Image (spheres, grey):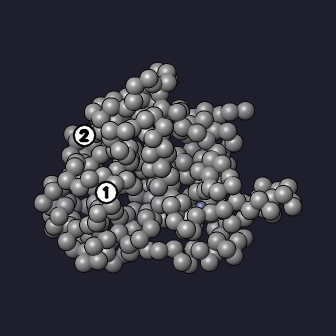
C-alpha cells in the first residue's frame, strides 16, 4: 500500500535546482530530493552514524548475492548506510518518489518559477514504509531546512555572485513517531556500524570535508552582506569555506524579512571556533553550533 506524505512549502527566495534554462519537473524533483538527502546525510553523521557520499566511488552497493542466498533484505543491506536505505543505492531503489504539485495537490503543468513567494506541495509517495527511526530523521531533516537552513543551492554549481537561493517555509511537518527519542535513533545508527566491518572501515576513512551537523553553525534573525561574507571566508587558509570553481562556498546568508538567517559548515571544531569568533566580531551574536541546534531539534 502506498503511503503519501504531503508537505506544504512556500519558497521565500527562488530555488536553485540546476541549469535554469533547461529545467524540467524531473530535474527539479531530483534536485530537491538531492538537497533533502544532503541534509539527511549531515544529520546522520552529526549523530555519529555513517553516511556515504552517493557521488563518490565509495557509495553503497546492495549485496544481491547475500540477499538471494538468504532471502533476507537485511543481509543484502548489511553494508548499506542508513541514508541509502531510504534514498536508494546501486541495487536498491529509493523508498519513495517525489511529486511536485501546486498547493491544492494538482500536478503542475508549469514548472516552479524563478520567483520566490510561490506555494506548492511536495508529495512523497512511499513505496516501502519508513522505519520509526527513519521517520524521526526525516522529520528532523525537514525541520532543519525549515527553521535553520535552506534547500538546493549548496550542492549544485550555482554561479558565484548570485544571491543565495532556496529559503523555504514548510507549513506542515510530519509528526514525530511516538516513543522514540534521539538516543534510540543514535542506537539504531550505531547498530548499523557495529554489524558491518565494511561500514566500520568506511567510517574511519570518511573525509573531514563531508558535511556533518556538529561542525555546522546557524544563526536566525541575522544576515551578513557580501563584504562580511568575504571577510568570514578569509579566516580559513585552506580555502574550504570559500570553495572554488564548481565547488560551492560554505557560508550562506539570507536577508529576507522575518526569515533572515546565516548558516554554514566547517571541517572541524577548530575551524568552527574561529568562525564563531569572526561572526561575533562582525556583530552577529549568539551563533549556535550544529550540536546546539541538534540538541534543540
Ligand atoms: Zn550509502
Residue at position x 62%, y 52% from top?
88
Count of numbered labels shown in the rendering: 2
For label 1, the SS is: strand
Q: Give the mark nearer the N terminus: 2 vs 1.
A: 2
Within the image, what quadrant is residue 293 found in?
A: bottom left
Q: Quadrant of the N terminus?
A: top right
User: How many neighbours does mark 2 have within 10 angstroms: few (below 14), some (14-19), or many (20 or more)?
Assistant: few
Residue at position x 58%, y 39% from top?
97
Q: Is residue 2 left or right of residue 203?
A: right
Q: Is residue 195 left or right of residue 294?
A: right
Tell which of 86 and 57 is nearer to you.
57
Residue at position x 48%, y 32% from top?
100
Residue 189, can we see it?
yes
Q: Are marks 2 and 1 in contact (CB under 8 Å)?
A: no
Tell which of 173 and 250 is nearer to you.
250
Circle 2 is placed at which residue position?
Answer: 258
Within the image, what quadrant is residue 116 found in?
A: top left
Q: Which disc is residue 20 wearing?
A: none
Residue 89 vs 147, above or below: the answer is: below
For label 2, the SS is: loop
User: How many neighbours does mark 1 have within 10 angstroms: few (below 14), some (14-19), or many (20 or more)?
Assistant: many
Q: Position of residue 247 (x, y in %)?
A: 34, 62
Circle 1 is placed at which residue position?
Answer: 263
Q: Position of residue 253 (x, y in %)?
A: 24, 53
Amino acid at each position: 500500500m502506498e503511503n503519501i506524505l504531503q508537505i506544504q512549502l512556500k519558497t521565500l527566495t527562488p530555488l536553485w535546482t540546476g541549469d535554469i534554462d533547461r529545467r524540467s519537473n524531473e530535474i527539479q524533483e531530483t534536485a530537491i530530493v538531492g538537497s533533502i538527502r544532503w541534509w539527511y546525510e549531515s544529520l546522520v553523521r552529526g549523530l555519529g552514524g555513517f553516511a556515504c557520499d552517493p557521488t563518490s566511488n565509495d557509495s553503497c552497493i546492495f549485496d544481491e548475492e547475500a540477499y538471494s542466498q538468504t532471502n533476507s533484505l537485511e543481509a543484502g543491506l548489511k553494508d548499506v548506510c542508513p541514508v541509502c536505505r531510504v534514498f536508494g543505492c546501486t541495487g536498491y531503489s529509493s523508498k519513495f518518489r517525489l511529486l511536485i504539485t501546486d498547493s491544492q495537490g494538482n500536478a503542475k503543468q508549469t514548472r516552479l518559477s524563478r520567483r520566490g513567494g510561490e506555494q506548492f506541495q511536495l508529495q512523497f509517495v512511499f513505496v516501502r514504509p519508513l522505519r520509526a527511526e527513519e521517520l524521526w530523521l526525516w522529520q528532523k531533516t525537514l525541520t532543519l531546512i525549515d527553521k535553520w537552513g535552506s534547500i538546493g543551492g549548496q550542492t549544485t554549481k550555482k554561479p558565484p555572485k548570485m544571491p543565495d537561493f532556496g529559503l523555504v517555509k514548510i507549513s506542515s511537518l510530519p509528526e514525530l513517531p511516538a516513543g522514540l527519542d534521539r538516543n534510540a535513533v543514535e542506537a539504531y545508527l550505531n547498530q548499523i556500524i557495529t554489524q558491518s566491518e565494511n561500514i566500520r572501515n568506511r567510517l574511519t576513512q570518511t573525509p573531514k570535508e563531508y558535511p556533518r551537523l556538529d561542525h555546522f553553525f546557524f544563526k536566525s534573525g541575522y544576515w551578513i552582506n557580501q563584504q562580511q561574507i568575504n571577510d568570514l571566508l578569509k579566516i580559513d587558509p585552506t580555502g574550504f569555506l570559500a570553495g572554488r570553481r564548481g565547488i560551492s562556498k560554505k557560508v550562506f546568508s539570507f536577508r529576507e524579512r522575518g526569515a533572515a538567517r546565516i548558516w554554514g559548515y566547517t571541517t572541524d571544531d577548530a575551524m568552527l571556533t574561529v568562525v564563531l569568533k569572526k561572526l561575533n566580531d562582525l556583530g552577529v551574536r549568539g551563533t549556535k553550533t550544529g550540536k546546539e541546534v541538534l540538541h534543540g531539534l
